């Protein structure tokens, strides 16, 4: 065989191979989304009854669009990573994004989410509580529609602590008395090196009358209130109130320690209430009560959480997506999320709504109303009035990471020195100059 | 690896081939050579696209301020990113952590792997069974195994955390104990791989030499150190090179076990946190390039100083 033939054949087979590969990519590319009804992809954190809410909205859309629910991973970090990775690549498969309240600035500044304007904006703002609405704004513009909010409260066992103190120092004293009486005395708090530690610290700084960043979000303020917050944190970590595994405690271990009978109180989100009601092994269920979040010199400022719906810049059907997002956060759907999944609403009227889910029947365990499933609604509403939002900056991830690293473990904080060090670190993080650990 | 090829090419040109270089090639030879190049071309193109391009691109990124969150503030900054990273304590702590993990785990893996290789080599009955059994840890997905370790070391759920020796503490919340657990998971996982590579080396050692040494009155230990080890040197060096390069890039075990908390970040974890979580392509790429240089240096030292070469190739590096 002559070499020429060799080459000829080689060329042909290469061409055939290349063509086959290209053809298969084309086929897959055409396979999605060319039907009549546009599909709106919703990406949200796992939530048990979200599918029912999606079904409600699909029914209401009446063929205008079809929402498809995609569930993100369980932890906030993994959710954010999936979203930003795909947004950075310009993925058009994302339409509605369920965002943690701390991500708004970052995604808006990067140009990955659309501004809410006109009628959509008016609808998203109508009757919405001020604190959650602020978490959806950046640079004076609205970038998301508040879906649910969240505030931490102090949850306690009234059989052990008939009147819990309203300050951390007061709780430490009460814990000492309980310890002396050989009773469960831990006050559970989120001291592990993760977002929860930033949440706790930020709340302490606000309770001390300060803030981590100034109101523009571009400069570090910290200072004396931060030193005070660090002292409080350190003293608590070294007191009888602290669980020995404080440096490993996140929200759920804290809840389990209390349900297991090892703790007298915990600071936590309201989801602990339905969880406690569902736990059949607990004997002190009727003594499980709530109080305002503890402070430094008086009542504290609760940490503020929650999530908002944003529309991706790369969405192919933005008009439908805005519409669908508004439906998903409608008062009726927020009531489902609150009564069935324990998520505090962002629309104030929902708190005062006493009609059960099925208005035709009487309220009860199977047909909850805000009154039956949400007895702590007034406490949440009043905590929302003073709650401490976390720093608003596009580099929130960096700021939070350096805070966690600097304060961990809380027991060995040296307030003045740590404040100086952290001030510097946060300053670097704001300019995205610094290195993350 | 590239060093090895460069070296062998150098040898080829300076040695036997040098004489023939002037002689004109026949038509058949020439077209054959051409065909050879053509056959290599697809592979070469794929290599350029999937490796050379990303490497060059990350070097370029490392010279820029490039944070995805501030698309308007992109710009060339020279070596500023390198200055930031190389003067940062987090980076050097990660470097130290990585080196500790590498050295400790590779030393244990070498000793245990050698023992395991000897056992597998000498086993008479159930050879296949023993070898399969030994390879099980290596066959388990690292992340799945890491979750197993994580649960085992978590107080209340894990059987290892409940051992009376350290009961009541949470070992994964302290730096030293976390590192020990990470190293343990690494050793457990990759000792079989080491053993497999070493077993290949053991197979090259001729049985006659062992017998001759025994005849001369060498004890088993002497036979091991004076006969087996010197003959196995190339295989050991290759195994060490592979493992060291792997260990320097350690990622999955740490990601699952601590995700870098309490000062347990390795270089890869730190790079990931800056590049993916932090969305800072400039700093993250700088770290990737620095890691690349570290790995290249280690490979260079192994090949040039210790004389590592592919087992079976005629040149066993510098002797």
Image (cartoon, rainbow, N blue to C red):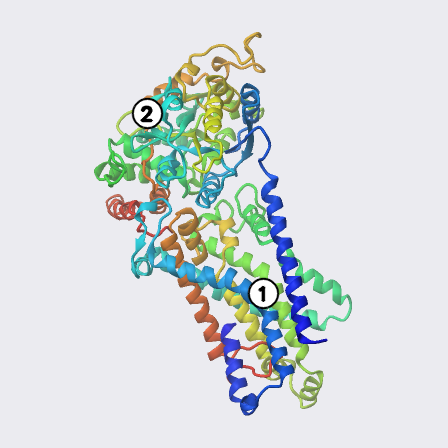
Q: Position of residue A328 (x, y in %)?
A: 49, 24
Residue A109 vertical placement versus B214 (above, below): above
Q: Quadrant of residue A282?
A: top right
> Could you say which is closer to the camera, residue B109 or residue A36?
A36
Q: How many marks?
A: 2
Q: Chain of mark 1?
A: B
Residue A267 image point, x, y percent: 40, 30
Looking at the image, the residue that sits furthest to the right is: B125
Secondary element at image label 1: helix
- Of residues B93 and A19, which is closer to you in this image? A19
Residue marked by disc 1: B42
Give me the residue at 51% from left, 23% from top.
A274
The residue mark sitting in front, 1 or 2, is: 1
Horizontal and vertical percent position of residue B203:
68, 76
Q: Is residue A403 above or below residue A270?
A: below
Q: Report the residue marked by disc 2.
A: A166
Q: Nearer the viewer, residue A55 or B277?
A: A55
- In this picture, residue A428 sits left or right of residue B228: left
User: On the image, which quarter does residue A52 sit in?
Assistant: top right
């Amino acid at each position: 065989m002559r070499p020429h033939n060799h080459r000829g054949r080689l060329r042909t087979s290469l061409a055939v191979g290349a063509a086959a590969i290209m053809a298969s990519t084309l086929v897959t590319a055409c396979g999605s989304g060319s039907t009549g009804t546009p599909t709106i992809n919703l990406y949200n954190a796992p939530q048990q009854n979200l599918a029912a809410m999606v079904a409600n909205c699909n029914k209401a859309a009446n063929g205008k669009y079809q929402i498809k629910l995609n569930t993100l991973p369980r932890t906030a970090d993994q959710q954010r990573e999936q979203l930003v990775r795909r947004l950075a690549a310009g993925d058009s498969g994302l339409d509605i994004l369920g965002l943690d309240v701390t991500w708004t600035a970052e995604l808006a500044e990067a140009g990955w989410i659309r501004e809410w304007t006109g009628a959509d904006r008016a609808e998203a703002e109508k009757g919405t509580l001020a604190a959650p609405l602020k978490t959806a704004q950046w640079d004076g513009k609205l970038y998301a529609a508040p879906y649910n909010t969240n505030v931490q409260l102090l949850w306690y066992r009234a059989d052990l602590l008939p009147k819990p103190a309203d300050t951390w120092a007061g709780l430490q004293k009460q814990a000492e008395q309980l310890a002396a009486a050989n009773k469960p005395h831990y006050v559970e708090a989120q001291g592990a090196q993760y977002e929860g530690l930033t949440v706790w610290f930020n709340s302490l700084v606000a309770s001390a009358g300060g803030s981590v960043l100034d109101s523009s979000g571009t400069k570090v303020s910290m200072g004396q209130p931060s030193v005070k917050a660090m002292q409080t944190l350190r003293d608590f970590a070294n007191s009888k109130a602290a669980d020995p595994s404080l440096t490993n405690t996140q929200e759920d271990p804290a809840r389990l320690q209390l349900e297991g009978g090892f703790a007298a109180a915990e600071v936590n989100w309201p989801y602990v209430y339905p969880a406690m009601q569902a736990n059949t092994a607990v004997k002190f269920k009727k003594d499980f009560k709530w109080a305002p979040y503890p402070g430094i010199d008086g009542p504290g400022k609760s940490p503020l959480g929650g999530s908002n719906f944003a529309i991706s810049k790369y969405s192919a059907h933005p008009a439908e997506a805005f519409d669908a997002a508004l439906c998903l956060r409608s008062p009726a759907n927020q009531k489902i999320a609150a009564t069935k999944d324990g998520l505090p609403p962002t629309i104030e009227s929902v708190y005062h709504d006493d009609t059960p889910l099925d208005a035709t029947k009487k309220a009860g365990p199977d047909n909850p109303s805000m009154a039956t499933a949400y007895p702590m609604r007034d406490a949440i509403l009043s905590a929302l009035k003073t709650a401490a939002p976390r720093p608003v900056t596009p580099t929130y991830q960096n700021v939070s990471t350096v805070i966690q690293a600097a304060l961990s473990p809380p027991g060995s904080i040296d307030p003045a020195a740590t404040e100086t060090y952290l001030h510097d670190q946060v300053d670097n993080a704001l300019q995205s100059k610094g290195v993350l650990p | 690896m590239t060093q090895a090829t460069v070296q062998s090419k150098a040898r080829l040109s300076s040695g036997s081939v040098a004489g023939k270089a002037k002689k004109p090639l026949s038509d058949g030879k020439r077209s054959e050579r051409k065909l050879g190049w053509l056959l290599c071309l697809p592979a070469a193109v794929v290599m350029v696209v999937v490796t050379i391009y990303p490497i060059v691109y990350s070097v370029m990124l490392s010279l820029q301020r490039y944070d995805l969150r501030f698309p308007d503030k992109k710009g060339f900054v020279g070596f500023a990113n390198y200055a930031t990273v190389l003067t940062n304590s987090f980076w050097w702590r990660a470097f130290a952590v990585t080196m500790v993990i590498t050295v400790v785990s590779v030393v244990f893996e070498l000793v245990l792997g050698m023992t395991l290789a000897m056992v597998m080599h000498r086993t008479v009955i159930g050879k296949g069974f023993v070898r399969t059994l030994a390879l099980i840890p290596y066959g388990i997905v690292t992340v799945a195994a890491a979750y197993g370790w994580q649960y085992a070391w978590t107080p209340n759920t894990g059987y290892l955390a409940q051992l009376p020796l350290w009961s009541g503490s949470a070992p994964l919340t302290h730096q030293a104990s976390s590192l020990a657990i990470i190293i343990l998971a690494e050793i457990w996982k990759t000792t079989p791989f080491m053993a497999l590579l070493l077993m290949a080396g053991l197979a090259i050692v001729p049985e006659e030499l062992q017998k001759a040494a025994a005849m001369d009155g060498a004890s088993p230990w002497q036979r091991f150190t004076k006969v087996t080890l010197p003959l196995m040197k190339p295989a050991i060096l290759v195994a060490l090179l592979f493992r060291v390069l792997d260990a320097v890039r350690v990622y999955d075990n740490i990601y699952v076990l601590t995700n870098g908390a309490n000062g347990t970040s390795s270089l890869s974890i730190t790079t990931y946190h800056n590049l993916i979580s932090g969305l800072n392509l400039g700093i993250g790429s700088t770290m990737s390039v620095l890691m690349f240089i570290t790995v290249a240096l280690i490979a260079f030292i192994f090949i040039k100083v210790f004389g590592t070469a592919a087992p079976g190739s005629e040149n066993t590096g510098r002797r």
